[in-house]
Amino acid sequence: MSYPTDRRYTKEHEWITPDGTIGITHHAQEALGDIVFVDLPKVGTEITAGKTLGTVESVKAVSDIYAPVSGTVTSVNGELATAPEKVNKDAHGAWMLKITVKNPAEMNALLSSADYEKFVSEEAGH
Amino acid sequence: MKHMTRKATRHISQNEGLIFEKSSPGKAAWKLPPLDVPEVDTAKLLGKQERQDLGNMPEVSEIEIIRHFTRLSTWNYAIDLGMFPLGSCTMKYNPRVNEFVSRVEGLANGHPYQPEKISQGALRIIKTLSDCLLEITGMDAITLQPAAGAHGELTGILLVRAYHQSKGNARKKILIPDSAHGTNPATAATAGYAVENLKSNERGMVDVAALAAQMNEDVAALMLTNPNTLGVFEQDIHEIAELLHAKGGLLYMDGANMNALVAKARPGDFGVDVMHLNLHKTFSTPHGGGGPGSGPVAVKKILEPFLPKPVVITKPDGTLAFEYNRPQSVGRVRAFYGNFGMFIRALAYILANGPDGLRQTTEDAVLNANYIRKGLEGVYDLPYSTPSMHEVVFSDKLQSQKGVKTLDLAKRLIDYGFHPFTMAFPLIVHGALMIEPTESEPKEELDLFIEAMKSIAAEVEEDPQFVLDAPHNTRISRLDETQAARKPVLRWKPENAQ
């Protein structure tokens, strides 16, 4: 799997584009299995880097989604409420929410696609 | 049918519709004699309160009712049919003598509002069970009120909060290892604490250095399961307790895995301040749908003033009574005194076994888990080689090379006449198969289980698709669990309903 280079990644398996669009990675959806429910914050919610912004529920487990950076939610992908399987089909296309990024410098702390790929392959070691 | 083992064979399994679908107007399972008193005009008596539409009530005969529920009951799997190797659940046999004792007239017909002077027997059961559990855990005081394990956890953490509060600072967070039961972080959050994750080391235990680095005066407690969910005893438990206590934190023990310790090691002796027990696991009371559960919480002296009230005390004349005057108590956590019927069963189990019997039970539970480990080592991947206690955790690493995952293995195991093991937990093992036989299983049943698991592994090698399509011999084939979660149908509606 190659990870798109137009965005940054977290060790908690989220991605974020420079304009503040957030989703979870292909690796994350694969580890979770069939996703049955995505719980996202309302437009206008303030999210804080490293804190939980919502949850994603699969047949196996409920997992937290962590905010890659701080910001304010401007838009939520309503499609996922009725079609959560879109995340399984195309994790890098099925965005979850858009935010206005509070401090763009926070993006620099995130992983590049190459670093994330390396991180995932090491994690898969066990 | 592929390889099958000695346990399972085919048997007629009758289809059965819903009881509503069997209904036809006018059928009934009873007939009343003619009315010999003046009829009451209910409409006049009740006015608007009289219900006109009784809804959809099934009308069936007595034999149809009996057959309906008897047929449904044959679809169940139960510990009375075979091994129930659900890891972390301690699905042990529920001895019949427990049921006999709990049905003794004076106990079965007792009422919680009876005056204390005619409830002395019931109070004596609460007191004796409390004393036995304190002896087993090495703790100082106990409440039997919580209704089950997670309720016990919440009660325990509320005691922790009350304790810190009494010192002027409730503190902010609770440390929880990444191998913990999911109820632990849920408990901490419900009690108003932030949860901080603690990584396990390569032996599957708490990383003491990481704990030392994360421990500070914001930490209210560490919630630890011992043995942990890998079935591994936390060997550094004394050091862990000391690290917590040095900074004023408390050690909470999730007693879900107490079946590995009873009459062998006492949490109170290895630094635990507060813990819950699951009577429906360790002490043989019914589990799951057959419950209710019961989750007593045992504490050290420092937490005693905060225990839920009432507590049972012995009066100077030797009689027992409930004491309500507990100004520092967190209050009631359950109506009346807890699930009393379970206290009777757990006490019957403890007294029937005695100290030596309980010790033997623990040894047998650990022996059985290790017998399975030895039998399946090499056939299934064993991610942690640390010695196992009462349960063993394998992974689907070898089988997943053929595309077969823990879920598929579990589905195929149903064909062999066993309840599946716990799948995909603990989360720190990718594709976990968590197996806990308990002491109840004779060697013969363990051999059948090992044989079944080996046979499934052989099938994965020869024809993985066959295992992916399992189960094959059940009434219905594999259900679409994803669709059931995404588009659940939560209730039956008649076909002609709007």
Image (tube, coloured by chain):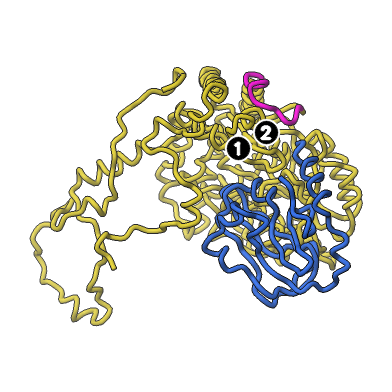
Identify the image quadrant of residue B195.
bottom right
For this rendering, which residue is in front, A95 or A6?
A: A6
What subunit carries mark 1?
A: B
Question: What residue do we see at 85% from left, 39% from top?
Answer: B238
Residue B381 colored in magenta in the image? yes
In this image, B449 relative to B47: left or right?
right
Residue B478 colored in magenta in the image? no
Quick one: quadrant of the N terminus of chain B? top left
- Magenta stretch? B374-385
User: Could you tell me if residue B194 is visible in this image?
Assistant: yes
* Disc 2/disc 1 C-alpha distance (Å): 8 Å
The percent position of residue B13, horizontal first and vertical second, equals: 31, 33
In this image, B249 relative to B288: left or right?
right
Q: Are marks 2 and 1 on the same chain?
A: yes
For this rendering, which residue is in front, B13 or A74?
A: A74
Is label 2 in contact with label 1 (beta carbons under 8 Å)?
yes
The dot on residue A76 is: none
Q: Which residue is mark 2?
A: B262
Q: Amino acid at mark 1?
A: Thr
Q: Earlier in the sequence, mark 2 or mark 1?
A: 2
Question: What residue do we see at 59% from left, 35% from top?
Answer: B405
Q: Main secondary structure of the magenta part?
A: loop
Q: Which residue is mark 1?
A: B282
**Chain letter for the yellow colouring in the rendering:** B
Question: What residue do we see at 50% from left, 54% from top?
Answer: B485
**Chain letter for the blue colouring in the rendering:** A
Question: Mark 2 Cα within 10 Å, few/some/many (few <14, many 20+)?
Answer: many
Question: What residue do we see at 82% from left, 63% from top?
Answer: B171
The percent position of residue B278, horizontal first and vertical second, equals: 61, 44
